[in-house]
Amino acid sequence: MFNEELRLEKPLRWGMIGGGRGSQIGYIHRSAALRDGLFTLVAGAFDIDPERCEDFGTHIGLDKARCYPDYKMMLEEEAKRHDGIQVVSIATPNKFHYEMAKAALEAGLHVICEKPLCFTVAEAETLKTIAEKNKLIIGVTYGYTGYQMIHQARKMIENGDLGDIRIINMSFAHGWHSEEVEKNDPGLKWRVTPEQSGPTYVLGDIGTHALYLAEVMMPELKIEQLMCSRQSFIASRAPLEDNAVVLMNFNNGAVGNLWVSAVNAGAIHEQRIRVVGSKASIEWWDEHPNQLVYEVQGKPKQLLDRGHGYLYHDDMAVTCDRIGCGHAEGLFESWANLYQRYAIAIDAMIGGDKETVENTWFPDIHAGLEGVRFIENCVRSADNGSAWVDYK
């Protein structure tokens, strides 16, 4: 059961870049970070418009003087304060992630960033180098991996319950953008603009979520080759894709496929992962995140539920159970579980407790880097006629 008595000596002083009024993802960040009392929001550069930033910040309880017109001023002014921010979350369009994360790390701040972390592997490696040099944490908000049943799946695979892993079938294929809705939706418009979004749309925006589920469940499994085919069914989105299929060969002989789409008309979310082994299979669907389907060859299908005593006593599968079995937990709980892990790691890093940092699971710089690496390889394959490429 979740330990609500876990407290830091002092909550981490936290600031935000982006995520202002009307931002759904900004609200999720704040709800998750503030839920357990491990962070205190004290500053923000929430909006490119200074007046909107100040108005929003004061309405959510911040001091007017700490609602900044831009992130550079926030970093500069907060560094002068004895009670300045220690951590910053970045919830902006992709274009700004690298420059903002780099500036924050160079200012001595721990960073929690939306994905994709940046545009290129070289940029991600630079961030990793700066973070390691300055003994700072980088967290990447792969928000679905805070769900407990993902970690139950990891433990089942680790313990050999599925046998040898043969097939990994991943999808994240919704239908909300099956028409050109970006004409009247600025929140989508930047996602389908290469200068703002980077080299991909759905591969980077939602595809890396599904891929990272597989990485969490099977950390030893590595891609050796892949083939990517991507399409722009809404022509105005080209060269960015709104649909893609990726085939993968893994280092243990397993194969995988990923379907990622924003034009799966009629679908709500459809983020699923099915892992097929030589003895059994498991399947998880994010619209029913409290359950894990477990199918042993020759036996009836089983539905495993979050919070029950028959689950493995994994660090995340049980200890992040917040309200006991039977009640439905959701995305806010998943994100809160991640922010709790960020807080533990950051507090340990500040205190020089390297062992706790190393033993605390959270989506870290390596998760962000590998997401960018996956995007680069997919683009390289797709731009070469959907050829098979060795994974670099």
Image: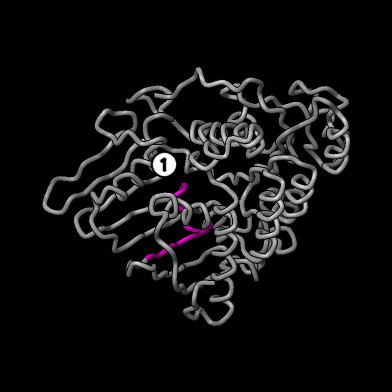
Identify the image quadrant of residue 63.
top right
State yes or no: residue 51 in magenta: no
- Tell me residue 89's x, y (percent): 69, 39
Check if residue 259 falls in the magenta segment: yes
x then y, percent, for residue 389? 50, 78
SS type, badge 1: loop
Please state the extent of the stretch shown in magenta in the rendering.
256-269
Compared with 137, 83 (above or below) is above
Callout 1 amino acid: Glu
Residue 186: x %, y % from top left = 72, 49
Residue that appears at 52% across and 21% down: 6
Residue 298's place in the image compared with 136, above or below, is below
Considering depth in this image, is 391 or 6 the residue closer to the camera?
A: 6
291 left or right of 125?
A: left
Task: Say how the picture is coloured.
Answer: one colour
In the image, what residue occupies the spot 44% across and 71% down?
224
Classify the position of the N terminus by image quarter. top left
Foreground residue, 320 or 172?
320
Q: Residue at horizontal 73%, vertical 58%?
A: 196
> Can you identify the residue that label 1 sits on?
287
Could you tell whether 233 is left or right of 102 in the image?
A: left
Residue 196 left/right relative to 234: right
Q: Which one is nearer the viewer's eye here, 326 or 254?
A: 254
Left or right: 223 in relation to 90: left
